[in-house]
Image (tube, rainbow, N blue to C red):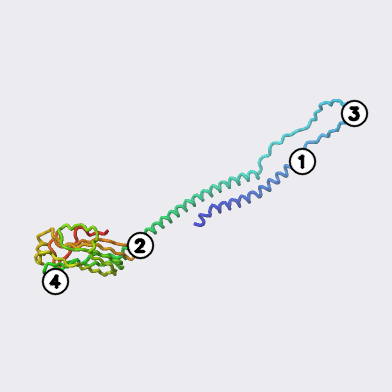
C-alpha cells in the first residue's frame, strides 16, 4: 500500500536525476561549439576601411562629391539550435508527462480513499445499528413483565363471591412503582366502558421483584336473590349475566420506562358456564377468563 501511494513521487525523482545527468554533457558540448564559432568569427571579420579626415577650415567650402566606399557584406544565417536548447524542450516534455502521471495517480488515490471512507462509514453505521439492536434486545430480555395470573372468585353458600387475582412479574428485573386500580361486580354483558378509575377504586403502589407476584383481593359482592346453586344455574341459562373484574396497571422497569395495560375478566356470559374448582379445604372457586375486549396495553 505504501509503495502504491509513493510510486508517482519516486517516478518524478528518478526522471529528474536522469535528465540532470543528460543536461551536464549537453551544456559542455554547447559551450565548446560556442567557443569554436567565436574563433571563426574573429578570422572572418571584414577589413576596416581607414577614413582620412577632411579639413573644412578653408576660406571657402566646396561641396563634396558623393563617394561611396565599397565594402564586402555577408549575411550570416541564424544558427541552428544546439543540444542545450533541445535538452530544455525534452526536460519540459518529460516534466509534463511526469506531471500527467502524477495527477492521474493522485486522482486514483483520491478515489481509493473515497471508497475506503465510504466503506468505513458503512461499517460504522452497521456497527451502530447492531449496537442499538443489541441494546434494545438486552432491554427487552432484562425488563420486567407484569401479567395477570390465577384470576378466580370464591363462591360462598349464600351467593356472595370474593374475586382475586395475581399480578406476576415474569421478567428478570424488578418492577418499580407498581400501581393497580380495579373494580368488580355483577353486570349485564357486554360490560360498559370504564372512562377512568373512580374514587372508590382500590389502588396500590409497590415493587415486585423478578419472579414475584402482587396479589389483589376484591371486596365481596352479593349476587342478589341467588345463593350459590342459583348463581351457577343463572350463569348457565342467561348468557348476558356475568361477573366482571376490571382494572388498570402501570409500572416502571429498571430502564425508567413506564408500561401500562388494562385487564377485563369475566365469569359466565360468552365464556360459558362457570368452570369450577375445589381446593383442599373444600372451598369452591370459579375461574375468571379474559374477555374478548378490554385487555391491551395503553
Mark 4 → mark 1, Cα distance in angstroms = 145 Å
Q: Quadrant of the C terminus?
A: bottom left
Circle 3 residue: 58
Circle 1 residue: 42
Determine which of the numbered discs, if any, sits on residue 135 in the image: 2
Q: Earlier in the sequence, mark 4 or mark 2?
A: 2
Residue 187 placed where, x, y %?
Answer: 15, 60
Give whichever of 151, 223 is nearer the camera: 223
Of circles 2 and 1, the one toward us is 2
Relative to 34, residue 229 above or below: below
Q: How many marks?
A: 4
Mark 1 → mark 3, Cα distance in angstroms = 42 Å
Give whichever of 68, 160 is nearer the camera: 160
Determine which of the numbered discs, if any, sits on residue 283 in the image: 4
Q: Quadrant of residue 51?
A: top right
Q: Quick one: SS at disc 4?
A: loop
Mark 2 → mark 1, Cα distance in angstroms = 97 Å
Q: Quick one: SS at disc 3?
A: loop
Amino acid at each position: 500500500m505504501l509503495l502504491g501511494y509513493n510510486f508517482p513521487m519516486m517516478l518524478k525523482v528518478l526522471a529528474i536525476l536522469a535528465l540532470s545527468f543528460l543536461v551536464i554533457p549537453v551544456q559542455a558540448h554547447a559551450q565548446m561549439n560556442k567557443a569554436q564559432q567565436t574563433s571563426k568569427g574573429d578570422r572572418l571579420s571584414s577589413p576596416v576601411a581607414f577614413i582620412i579626415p577632411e579639413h573644412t577650415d578653408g576660406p571657402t567650402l566646396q561641396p563634396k562629391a558623393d563617394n561611396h566606399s565599397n565594402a564586402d557584406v555577408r549575411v550570416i544565417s541564424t544558427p541552428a539550435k544546439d543540444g542545450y536548447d533541445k535538452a530544455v524542450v525534452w526536460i519540459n516534455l518529460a516534466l509534463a508527462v511526469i506531471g500527467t502521471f502524477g495527477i492521474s495517480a493522485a486522482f486514483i488515490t483520491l478515489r481509493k480513499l473515497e471508497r475506503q471512507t465510504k466503506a468505513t462509514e458503512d461499517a460504522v453505521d452497521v456497527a451502530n445499528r447492531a449496537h442499538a439492536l443489541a441494546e434494545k434486545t438486552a432491554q427487552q430480555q432484562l425488563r420486567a413483565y407484569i401479567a395477570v395470573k390465577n384470576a378466580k372468585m370464591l363462591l360462598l353458600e349464600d351467593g356472595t363471591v370474593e374475586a382475586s387475582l395475581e399480578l406476576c412479574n415474569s421478567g428478570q428485573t424488578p418492577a418499580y412503582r407498581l400501581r393497580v386500580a380495579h373494580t368488580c361486580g355483577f353486570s349485564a354483558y357486554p360490560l360498559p366502558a370504564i372512562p377512568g378509575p373512580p374514587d372508590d377504586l382500590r389502588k396500590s403502589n409497590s415493587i415486585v421483584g423478578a419472579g414475584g407476584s402482587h396479589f389483589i383481593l376484591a371486596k365481596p359482592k352479593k349476587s342478589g336473590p341467588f345463593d350459590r346453586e342459583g348463581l351457577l344455574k343463572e350463569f348457565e341459562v342467561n348468557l348476558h349475566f356475568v361477573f366482571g373484574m376490571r382494572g388498570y396497571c402501570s409500572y416502571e422497569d429498571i430502564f425508567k420506562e413506564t408500561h401500562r395495560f388494562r385487564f377485563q375478566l369475566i365469569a359466565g356470559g360468552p365464556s360459558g358456564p362457570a368452570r369450577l374448582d375445589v381446593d383442599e379445604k373444600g372451598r369452591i372457586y370459579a375461574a375468571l377468563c379474559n374477555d374478548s375486549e378490554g385487555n391491551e396495553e395503553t
